[in-house]
Every structure is written in structure tokens, then in C-alpha cells.
Amino acid sequence: MDWVLFVTQILNGLQLGVLLFLLASGLTLIFGIMDFVNLAHGSLYMIGAYFCGTFTDITDSFFYGIILAIPATAVVGVIVEIIIIRRLYSQDHLDHVLATFGLILCFDALVHFAWGPEGMAIPLPAILDGQIEILPDIVFPTFRLLIITTGLTLAIILYLVITRTRSGMLIRAGASNRTMIGALGIDIKTLFTLVFGAGAAMAGLAGMMISPITEASIGMGNDIIIVAFVVIIIGGIGSVKGAFIAAILVGFIDTMGRSFLDTFLKLLLSAESAETAAPALSAMLIYILMATILIFRPQGLFPPRGR
Amino acid sequence: MEKATRFTLRVKITVVIFLVLFFLPIYTGLTDNGFYLDLVNRLMILAIAAASLNLILGHGGMISFGHAAYLGIGAYCVGIPAYYGVDNGPLQIFLAVAASGIFALITGAICLRTKGVYFIMITMAFTQMVFFGFVSVEEYGGDDGLVIDTRSNFGSFINIEDNINLYYFILISLIICLFLIHKITKSRFGLVIEGSRSNEQRMRSIGFDTYRYRLICYVIAGCICGYAGALLGNFTNFISPEMMDWAASGELIFMVILGGTGSLLGPVFGAAAFVILEEWLSSLTLYWHFIFGALLIMVVLFARGGISGIVTYLGNRKQ
């Protein structure tokens, strides 16, 4: 086994994991509190990336770009919540799915209109563009390391907010019984809007952090959102802790599968059939993981209590 | 009285639609306009797919966001044998239906253990799995798709290499599938499915194993849609994983809702409205997806009965 590659891939898996967590935590919170399925969460990821690109262009600094783009994405989230999503809470899941699917089409067309059909490359500042030797012989891109630390820091902050603050208490209370906290005089409408905005900001941040690597493009959110769904299904819909563990798990398994599955299959199969089977199998690995977990735990690993 | 008028309007519309469909090739042949024939072919294939989705979504209350998987599986069951030079039509159709059925059985057995949002997301994820599976198989074109050189060969029965023959083949398939779905929904089996949608607990306490009924229904819908996929492969002569992109599944749901979930012909109206809207809007503007998306949101917020609901409404008003 090539240890340098192995450690690098562990870090890559972790990076994918924290990005997925940023997306999935918003999704799972929105579902947990409002019982709302938001397919258009991936669009906010895309919007975040494009905002970041534009603000980086204007201010000539990636940092300012991010600092401006986060509230901008949150504002977009809040506006969408107030105009459309708010009317949907009382309807059933099918309506949520259809309306947010419509939203995706609208967002994709709007981005096409505003930024053109081509992707948007976002340049990194020189400090982040290099590599760091993290262990002897193992170098890792600085920017990816930054993504990992940011993601983990945010996970800790989110944990503290949810367990230690008053708004976190409201969020937990809302997740276990919405009607009850409404009856206790809490303004749920505003709470919903704020949580939606926060979810949008986190999804947007994930998009901003990936775009210097992959560039911002139309539909970039549509593939990753399904993986984020897989994450919250595995974690248990509504559970932030579950989302975190599942995101890291999915990130690892996906990355490891893509890099080492063919080596592993060669132990079992002929080299030729391993070469053909490995790419298809590794692409399907996380879904197989999801199916296996669901067979034993239909509610996911950490189903939230009280529903 | 009220019921009678609604019935007549419905029957009138149905008869007119199928008469138009039946004579369309003569018109397009006279005016030499193959474009409309292609449009209607696509429409009818999507109508079969949407009708099969309506069986589980409308009647069974199982919101599958992954129904396009069967379109893809069916199409690949025509394409992959054709790639190896096997163009035996009945065999390809059998493969398409069987493979779709098996996929529906395996995934359905897992999906149906869950409910609500889980069900929606899991069906979506399984379709994405098939999507990525085909994307990464280089042998069959991967991302770029696969060209089908020969259409299914039905020997002396019918030669669908000819476009007019293919058209009638699809039209007859549509009628048979609709008839089949009609029979299923009106049967005892269909009533159990309907019952377990409105109150599963009650159905279970009467003594029905709702899980098994739903699973069978899910498999039947998969098989019918797989058949539509085989037709789609024959019609387009080209298959790519994009057919089972999750947007394609979303579009199928849109057709069902646009047409109205309650009725047999709803999905046909829905598919027709969808294909025509798509064609019309995309000729108007490059950003037609926006209008499309906005329309979708409007339908959800303001017109839950769909086109079929509007027909019912008009029928009631006329009396």
C-alpha cells in the first residue's frame, strides 16, 4: 500500500465530508424543524459560488468575496422563503418536491441569464494556492486544508449554537414539536425564515469553497444535492449529529472507493474485469452503503426522537 | 346528472384525441411534416411512462422521484443487445420489462420499508446510482451515450424501421398500457392499493399485507415504464445516462401532476402539455426553463387538480 497516497486520500475524503456536512446540515435542519423537503438547496450552493466569483472579481480578493457572498446568499434564501417556501409548509411533501424542483429550473435559468452559459473560474490568492508539507513526505494543497478546518470549525460552532444557546434551544424544541413552541408564544415564522437563511448561507459557503477547485457552473448543485440527501438519509433526517457522522462516512467511502477499489478488486477478480467493474462499482458505493444501512435501520443511524 | 355530463365530456375528449392520433400520420404524410410525428411519438412514450408513474404516485400515494431509471434501463436493454448485434425485438422487450421489474423489486423492497420524505429521497438516490453506474461503464459509451444502429426486429409482424409503423406500434402500445392500468386500478388489487394510500393502518388491520401489495404495484409500474424505455430507445436510436437524470424523473412527476393524478387520461394530458410547452417555450426564449419552473410552482400553489381537474370543472359547469 502506498502510504502517501493513502493519507492524501483520507484528507480528500475528509474535505468532501465537511463540504457535504455544510450542505446536509442545512437540509436536515430545514426538514427537522419545518418538515420541508428542499430540493433547491443545491441551487443555493450554486448561487453562493457565483456570488463569490463576482464579489471576488469586484473586490479583487477571495476573502472579501466570501465575506460578501455569505450574507448575499443568506438574503437570497430568506427572500425565497418569504415569497414561495412559506406558502408550502402546510402542503404535502409531493408539493414541496415539485415546487422546489420548479425553483431549481428557475435558478438555473437565472444564473444562465446573469452569468452566461460558461462556468466561472475563481482565482485563489497566492497564500492559499500552494501546498504544505503536513507530515514528512506528505504534501497537501493549502486551500483544501483550509476547507477542512473551516468545515470542522463550523461543525463545532453549529454544535455549540444548537446545544448551548437560546436560539439553539428553540431549534431543538421546534424539531420535536412545532405546534407546542408556537403555542408557547414563540414566533415560529421568523424562526423558520432565520433557519432557512442560515441553511442557505451554509450551502452557499460550501459552493464558495469548492468553486476555486472545480469552478462555478450551472447545475453544479444538482449532483451534490443527491449525495447530501444520501447523507441525511443515512444520518437520520432531522439529526445534525447524524448528518455530521454520515457526511464524513460518505466522504471517506466515496473517495476511498474511487482510489482503491480497483486494487482491492484485483485481489478477487482478474485484472481485466476488475478494471471494468471498479469504476461502476465505486460510483455506486455510497448508494449501496445507504441501502445496506436502511435495511437494518429504516430511519437512519440517528433518528431524531419525539416524532 | 352531474356525473353524466362529466362523463360525456371526458369520453368526447378521449375519442377526439385518439381519432386525431390515429389519423395524424396521414396528415403529416400529406404535408410531408415529419416533425410533428416525432413530437407525438415522444409524447406518447412519455405518456406511457407518466401513466405508469401515476399508478404508484396517484393511486398508490408512493411518491417516486426516480421513475426515469426505468426509462433508462428499458432503453439500455434495447441498446446493449443491439450493440452486440442482437436485434430480436421480443427478446429486447422481454429484457427491458424483466430488468426493470427486477430493479423495481430490489429497490422497492428497500424503499417501501420507509415512508414520506425517506421514500422520495431513496427512490431518487437509487436512480442516481443507476445513472452513475451507466456513466462509468465506458464499454457502452459512458457519459456520451450509445447509438443504436438497428431498431428492434419483430420479423414479419411489423417493421418498425419505418417511422409510420413505429408510430402505430407506439400508439397501440399506449392504448394497451392505458387499458392495462385501467384494469389494474379497477380490480380488487387496485382497490387495496388505493385503500392503503388513504389509510394504511386500517387496511393492515383488515388483514391486508399492504407492503406486499405495494411492492407488487411498484414492480408493475416499473415494468410498464421499462417497456416505455424500450420504445424510447427505438424511437431516439440513441441512449445516454441523461435519460435517467433526476431532472427527468422530476419532469415525469410534473407530467402526472400537470395532468391530474386522479384519472386514467390525466398523465396523457400531462405528457402532451409538457412536450408541447417545452417545444413552444424553447422556441420563444433561451431562458425557457425559467417560465417552465415558474409554471410548475404556480401549478403547485394554485391548480392542484391539473388539466384533468380543469376538464372536470368545465364538465360540471356546463350542465
Image: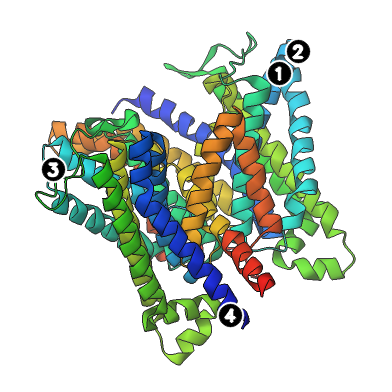
Is B153 rendered above or below residue B315? Answer: above
Q: CA distance from mark 2 to mark 4?
A: 65 Å
Q: Residues within 10 Å of mark 1 (few under 14, many from 20)?
A: some
Q: Nearer the viewer, mark 3 or mark 4?
A: 4
Task: Tell which subunit mark 2 falls on.
Answer: A
Task: Tell which subunit mark 1 falls on.
Answer: A
Q: Quadrant of the N terminus of chain A?
A: top left
Res B109 → quadrant: bottom left
Q: Nearer the viewer, mark 3 or mark 1?
A: 3
- Marks 1 and 2 in Cβ contact (< 8 Å): yes
Q: CA distance from mark 3 to mark 4?
A: 49 Å
Q: Quadrant of the C terminus of chain A?
A: bottom right
Q: Secondary structure at mark 1?
A: helix
Q: How is the image coloured?
A: rainbow
Reading the image, the residue beneath label 4 is: B3
Q: Residues within 10 Å of mark 4 (few under 14, many from 20)?
A: few
Q: Position of residue B12 (x, y in %)?
A: 50, 66
Q: Nearer the viewer, mark 2 or mark 3?
A: 3
Q: Secondary structure at mark 4?
A: helix
Residue at mark 3 shares a chain with residue at mark 1: no
The reply, left or right, for residue B6 in relation to residue A26 is: left
